Amino acid sequence: MSAMHGELWLYGALVVAGFLPHEIWRWIGMVLSRGLDERSEIVIWVRAVATAILAGVIAKLTLAPTGALAAIPLAVRLGAIAVGFAAFLALRRSVLAGVLAGEAALMLGAALAVP
Amino acid sequence: MSSPAVTHPSDPPASAAFLAGMRAGLLSVFSLVLAATYVGIGALSQGLGLTLWWSLTATVLFWAAPAQVIFIAALAGGAPLLETAAAVSISGVRLLPMVVAILPLLKRPDTPLYRLLWAVHLTSIATWIEGQRGLPQWPRERRIAFYNGLGAGMCIPAASCTVLGYALAGRLPAMLGAALLFITPLVFLTSLVRNARDGVDRLALALGLATAPVFAVLEVGLDLVWTGVVAGTAAYAAQRWTRRQP
């Protein structure tokens, strides 16, 4: 790639075709939030939309992952998420406990399922 | 024109709020997520022949891993710039509702927009979730400083792990790669449940988890945005309806 384009061209592309078209949504959000109160109905609704988008990200990362995670069977991934979530609930809602338990379940499941 | 006093003598100084934010960002479990994510991005960038400085600049300018991955993959694949810009822009739409939901916690009605520019740039999933948790504990006048510190603190693992991944490229065992990728859904799920303020948040999460696979299978464009609008609106409507019942 560097052979095709100069270093300066890559920085220019990063700003014009990467940063600006991506950042614009943050700026639009900034303008739209003018005059809104955190307890207003619109903000409660928008927060529900943002939360549901994140839920969608979680579902996609678990059900249809990319890279090395895709090599681990779906049943193992789902089981490991369930174990992690159960550990989180059982251990005083500790996110770290959930991560450690989920990862341990993933490793164990992968070792058993993938010979 | 005199403006009303906005700070109290008892308020901690802005620098203290910034440093507390940095500390919260560094110690957050999201630093683990960012570290894992950017090790992957650093390795990918090295593999595609990008320079380390360019990759670091991209980490800071996007401050959103999906957009960065889409951009470098498109660049490496020789996609036309306009097409690349469109793909990156679509991945950024999800940031709009996050900014709209977090800014009312940060600002006052008269806060000038330029004071929020850095804060909105820092808004991504990690700062959004940790911000909702940490911000209410600060007086309103110190929240922008706290939030800027939170983002700055999270930039440290992100940037240093971009470098680490760049250096380790091609030498990561597959099992470690899978384990790193799995940190993200685990942290997102548990921290969203931990942070849920009321029934709407929990219902939006549950409905989003259930709806996302449907939209993904239907292969509609912008499936994440559709998931958000449909599941989020349904959760909001259900909560309004139950609130009205005696």
Image (cartoon, coloured by chain):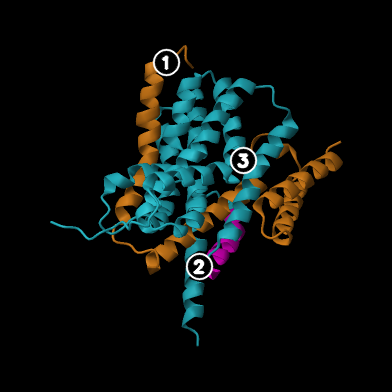
Chain colours: A orange, B cyan
Closer to the camera in the image, B100 or B150: B150
Q: Is residue B91 above or below residue B193?
A: above
Query: Could you tell me residue B229's position as x and y percent?
Result: 46, 59
| A85 relative position to A40: left or right | right
* Residue, disc 3: B32
Chain of the residue that carries numbered disc 2 in the rendered image:
B
> Identity of the amino acid at label 1?
His
Q: Amino acid at mark 2?
A: Ala
In space, the residues marked 2 and 1 are separated at their CA atoms by 48 Å
Chain ID, mark 3: B
Q: Are marks 2 and 3 in contact (CB under 8 Å)?
A: no
Determine crowd level at label 1: few under 14, some 14-19, many 20+ residues with C-alpha closer than 10 A: few
Question: Image quadrant of residue B27?
Answer: top right
Residue placed under numbered mark 1 in the picture: A5
Q: Position of residue B132 (x, y in %)?
A: 48, 56
Q: Residue at x 66, y 47 (%)?
A: A62
Residue B234, label in figure: 2
The answer to whether the residue labelled 2 contacts the one labelled 1, judged by CB atoms less than 8 Å apart, is no
| Magenta part of the chain | B198-214
Q: Are marks 2 and 1 on the same chain?
A: no
**What's the distance in space between the residues labelled 1 and 3, CA to CA?**
34 Å
Q: Dot 2 surroundings within 10 Å: few (below 14), some, or many (20 or more)?
A: many
Compared across the picture, whether A5 is left or right of B70 comes to: left
Image point (55%, 35%), residue name: B157
